[in-house]
Amino acid sequence: MLDQWYNGVVTRIINETDNTRRFWISIPEMRTFDFKPGQFVTLDLPIHEKKNKRWRSYSIASHPNGTNEIELVIVLLEGGAGTTYLFNEVREGSELVVSKPQGAFTLPDPMEKDIFLVCTGTGIAPFRSMIHHLHLHQIAHPPIYLIFGTRFEKDLLYAQEMKCLMAEHPNFRYLPTLSRDENPDWWGERGYVHAVYEQLLADKRPANFFLCGWKVMIDEAKQRILAMGYDRKDIHLELYG
């Protein structure tokens, strides 16, 4: 049961894609909002009388930067009470009730094996936090592969940002993967995320897998990774929806 809540203020909202928005929320009562890259917060939204019907959890998309502000990236779900409220009622200056940071979906310490970050949609949020944190603090790490699956190029989140980080960071590879886009000039991967990590790991070298996104993708990834000969303890997941 959550026992620590804060009054947050929405400081900025940006439309990232047709159905995805970035929300920046500050916590005025705190000087710094400390969290580990990969953690999430829960919002207590005024959409139901019962607590468990009001709570919606979202991974923190920003990295710890010593301020009291965090960023969330949220997709509008058809018929979803929580996201409908956030998209239709929340404006810059709106107040939101925010929980303390939660979750153990964080990078291993020490990082000894290659790391595969596999996501779809807004599942990129915790991975963006991790990559920026490593880059900002120049933390040494084994090769990290971010495999981000979506249908069309227009649905990619933080694409230019990830390309820049890859250019500056020799041990980081950004592998956006489109399943339906037929643009002949597309520079990234095509198909589904599973074929990408299977091909990269044809040699079956030691690896850690972090999976974040919708249940269908995560279920298939778990089956395929285990079939490749990896152990359940090599797989870490954060389920959306």
Image (cartoon, helix red, strand yellow):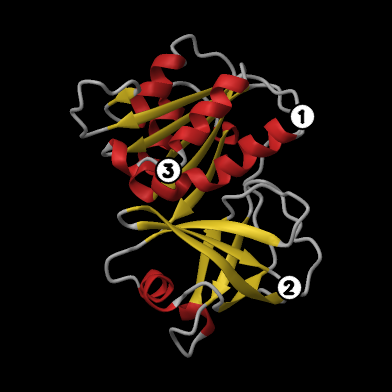
> In which quadrant will I find the C terminus?
bottom left
Give 65 or 1, whichever is nearer the viewer.
65
Tell me the kind of residue under disc 2. Answer: Pro
Callouts 2 and 1 close, C-beta under 8 Å: no
Left or right of residue 237: residue 112: right
Q: Secondary structure at mark 3?
A: loop
Measuring 32% from the left and 57% from the top, which residue is drawn there? 19
| Residue ID for mark 1 | 110
When asked about the image quadrant of residue 127, the answer is top right
Of tags 2 and 1, the one toward the viewer is: 2
* Crowd band around label 3 with a 10 angstrom C-alpha radius: few (<14), some (14–19), many (20+): many
Which label number is shown at residue 157? 3
| Residue ID for mark 2 | 28
Name the outermost residue toward the right.
31
When asked about the image quadrant of residue 33, the answer is bottom right
Measuring 79% from the left and 61% from the top, which residue is drawn there? 32
Task: Give the mark nearer the N terminus: 3 vs 2.
Answer: 2
